[in-house]
Image: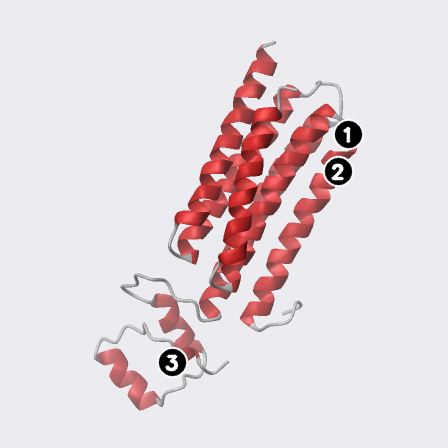
Amino acid sequence: MTYEIPIYILLAASGLCILRISRGPSIPDRVIATDAFVSIIISIMVLLSLETNDFLMDIAIVYSVLGFLGTIAISKYLEGKKIGE
Amino acid sequence: MVNEMIGLILIFAGSIISFIGAFGLLRFPDIYCRTHAQTVVNVGGTCLILLGVFFQAPFFSLYPVKSILLIIFIFLTSPVGTHAIARAAYKSGVKPKKLHEDELGYKIMENEKPLVREKDYEKLKQSGYRFRKRRFFKRR
């Protein structure tokens, strides 16, 4: 396991993101912190997929798509429009 | 051997950079500054780690293809999401802390119908009012 130290550093970074999510003063703060949290979890998944099987990489691709769609949907909701506009 | 060394260096650099970005996400005072830190985490950290995986993985497999695909996808979608959420934050009434000139406020006031009457709006605009207050956004 040569990837232990980067995974621990990334876990500490995700803890900082969770702090910002918990005490962000407004909604866009929380959305931005959630986006950073999603990308950190993606990099942890990619590092774990080097050790174990292949399928965690596919889960990382799908998870990045889901994070992007969540950000766009919440920003549309905050602007007061519907999705198709 | 050289490939594995390059991959390890890239993975360590990416993890440290994403930790710095997450620390900046706590320290910056404002949303419009925090978008900068979020971009550091997205593009700097994750793309460096994916480049490291591209060097580290065995060459004749599907790992390098998938990592390049993820890098292209993150480069396409990260600016779109940040731009959309910053614009939505402005329109929902969150103002920046130190603001000298509010050009997007002028544009929104010119396109939509303002709360104040038009004479008052012209008078305010001529007297150099900067639209710092939130009372123009009470209509929603």
Chain letter behind tag 2: A
The residue where tag 1 is placed is A54
Disc 1 vs disc 2: Cβ atoms closer than 8 Å?
Answer: yes
Q: Could you tell me which secondary element the residue under label 3 belongs to?
A: helix
> Residue B104 in the image: x percent, y percent?
39, 67
In the picture as drawn, the residue positioned furthest to the top comes out as B1
The residue where tag 2 is placed is A58
Q: Could you tell me which secondary element the residue under label 1 belongs to?
A: loop
Q: Is residue B140 visible?
A: yes
> In this rendering, is residue B81 above or below A41?
below
In space, the residues marked 3 and 2 are separated at their CA atoms by 48 Å
Between residues B8 and A21, which one lies in front from this camera angle?
A21
Marks 1 and 2 on same chain: yes
Q: What type is the residue that disc 1 sits on?
A: Asp
Q: Residue at horizontal 44%, vertical 71%?
A: B93
Between residues A38 and A2, which one lies in front from this camera angle?
A2
Q: Mark 3: few, some, or many residues within 10 Å (few <14, many ≥20)?
A: few
The circle drawn on residue B135 is: 3
In space, the residues marked 1 and 2 are separated at their CA atoms by 8 Å
> In this rendering, is residue B16 above or below B128?
above
**Quadrant of res B20:** top left
In space, the residues marked 3 and 1 are separated at their CA atoms by 55 Å
